[in-house]
Every structure is written in structure tokens, then in C-alpha cells.
Amino acid sequence: MHFIRIIIVFLVASILADAAAAQDAREHTQTAIEPRPQNAVRAILRAFDKYAIVALGEVHRNQQAHDFIISLARDASFPGKVNDIVVEFGNARNQDLMDRYISGEAVSPGELRQIWRDTVNILVWDAPVYERFFAAIRALNRGLPEGKRLRVLLGDPPFDWNEIRTKEEWERLVPRRDPHAAKVIEEEVLAKNHKALVIFGAQHLMRSSAYNRFSSKPQEMNLAEILDQRHPGTTLLIWPHTSGYFISELEPRFASWPKLSLAFVKGTWLGTMHIGEPTSSPKLEELTDAFLYLGPVRSLKESRPSPELYRDEAYFHELLRRDKIQGGFNRLELEELKKSLLRKP
């Protein structure tokens, strides 16, 4: 009985400590410095005066994020500030094909689709915002003199899905992703004294070692940390506004912010916000440098692939094969697509 009382006391104390920590965090956000939201396009263009790399964390398939990327690239000042755009959604095996396409050469739709379909992650890049991005940069380059044309660098490692037959083979690919992207940036951007916009999933573009003090298993260095370690001071990290991560709970405090605003977070109440439970997660300013506000979470839309893409039976069966190798990560979406196809003649 005495032992049970000790356990109860311990649990109550733990709950009270967590609640106190959460309350302290909430109170601190009320008293810390107010962040200064700025026009995001203007702020990012100014950032290139200081940084060689501006790394924009992407929420996969987010329509507003991709609308913003297009508006940024189309700004008249962008080609004078930026040489390259490095993206997650392309297999580097197809870099020559991408160079041809971006320069305006004729490339068939079937060839072009290989760029984003044959990546380590499957299915996600079939959303129309990714093909639209490549087409937008190609169109932009048509109006630029040769010396100002943008180059799109494909950041996913080069490999051939025809040679991947087991989960073990696929899992050996996954750890290559961030080191390969860093190598591309080092060799094709920094070594040439270029400047680049980097568009990768947000998990690749945060200082994830901040989580190490909450875990006995250290985080592997991601793209952001590889660049920070090898090239300190060259990269500005931007975290996108999205649901979850507890930041969405602060939506009332963003009510006065214009959509598509950028704010630097260090020393502000936003920077001191924990990304999860305060006792088990770092502050936002430990993970990133700036915060991109896209608009209220309820207004954010997802870009979804058309089910018609999957009437190509050879491609759909290949997706099923790849998904089985990966362990079924995309099983639910593939099942929905299959049902959708069966409902239509």
C-alpha cells in the first residue's frame, strides 16, 4: 500500500510539473518581444544580400506554399539575386533532362514525369503543384538573358527504381538523401559562388539536434545541420506555418498578420514557443531562423493528384510494387485511388 502511495505521489508531482512548465511557457509568450511580420517576398530577397542559401521548409502539397514560391520566383528582382533553385522533388539521375527542359528544349511529358516520379519517396510529387513549378521556371527563363537564367538542381539521390527489389535496398537509399542534397549545394552552388533557394520538406530544414537533449538516441544530421556544420553562417532557415506543432494554437495572435508574411523568431514570443510539450520539445528559435505565415490554418489547401493519372495501369502497378517495398507507407492513398478508378467507367 505504501508503494502504491509513492507511485500516486510521483504521478501527481509529474503531472503538476508538466502543467507548471506549460503555464510558464504560455506566460512567457505573452511577455516576450513581438515578432515583426514583413512582406515575405521582399524579406527573402533582402536575405540573399546576407546569405548564400535561403532554405524554405516545404509542407508537402500545400497549395498556398507553392503559390508563394511561384510569386517569389516571378518577382522581377529574383533572377538578379538567385542563380539556382534546389528541390527535393526530383531524382538527380535526371539532372541533364531537367537542364534541357528548363533551358527551353523539347521534352516529352513522359520523360518529364520521370523527374518527380522516380524519387525515393513515391506518389507525393504527383500533386500538380510540382509539375507547375518546373513549368513556371521554364517559362520564366524564356524571358531572361542567358546569364540570368535560373537552374533547377534536383536534390534527391540518383538511383534506378528498376534496381530496387527489397525493403533493405530501399532503406539503404534513405540515409543518402540529406548528404546527397548537401553535396549538390556544395558543388553546384557554393563552389561556384552562386546563391540558391532550397525547397525541401521542413523536417530536412530544421536544426533537429535541438531534440537530442530529450532523447537518448541522437538525431542524424539533416540537410540544414550538414550545411551549418560545414558552412556556418551561409544558410537562413525558414519554417512554414501549418497545423500541429502547437503553433496553430496561437492562431489568434496571428490575426493581425498579413498573409504571406515572414518574421524572424529569435528573442520573440514566437521563437520561445515549444514545438510540442514544453518538457519534451525544443523552442522554435532553436530549430529555425524565420517563420513564414501563409494564412489561417483553416484556409490552407492541399494540392491533390488527379485520379486520372493512375489509369495508366503500368504506372499504378509500379506504385503498388514500390509501396510494398517501402512497407506500405502510401497504402491508404493508393487504396482510395483504386476505389476511385473502379467507380469510373
Image (cartoon, grey):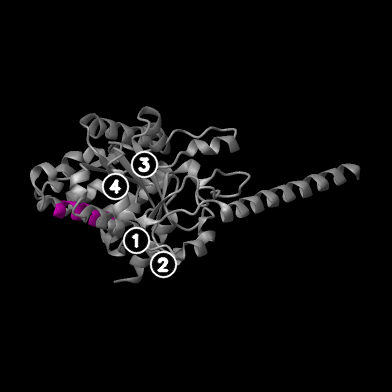
Magenta extent: 130-140
The residue that disc 2 covers is 299
Tell me which amino acid carries mark 2. Ser
Q: Residue furthest right?
A: 1
Q: Position of residue 82 (x, y in %)?
A: 22, 43
Q: Position of residue 266 (x, y in %)?
A: 47, 45
Res 126 visible = no
Describe the element under mark 2 as helix, strand or loop: helix
Residue ID at (10%, 53%) = 143
Packing grade of label 3 (10 A; few <14, some 14-19, many >=20) is many
Q: Between tags 1 and 4, which lies in front?
A: 4
N-terminal of the pair, mark 2 or mark 3, is 3
Residue 82 lies left or right of residue 142; in this view the side is right
Describe the element under mark 4 as helix, strand or loop: helix
Residue ID at (23%, 57%) = 132
N-terminal of the pair, mark 1 or mark 2, is 1
Packing grade of label 1 (10 A; few <14, some 14-19, many >=20) is many
In which quarter of the view is residue 260 placed?
bottom left
The residue that disc 4 covers is 46
Residue 61 lies left or right of residue 280; in this view the side is left
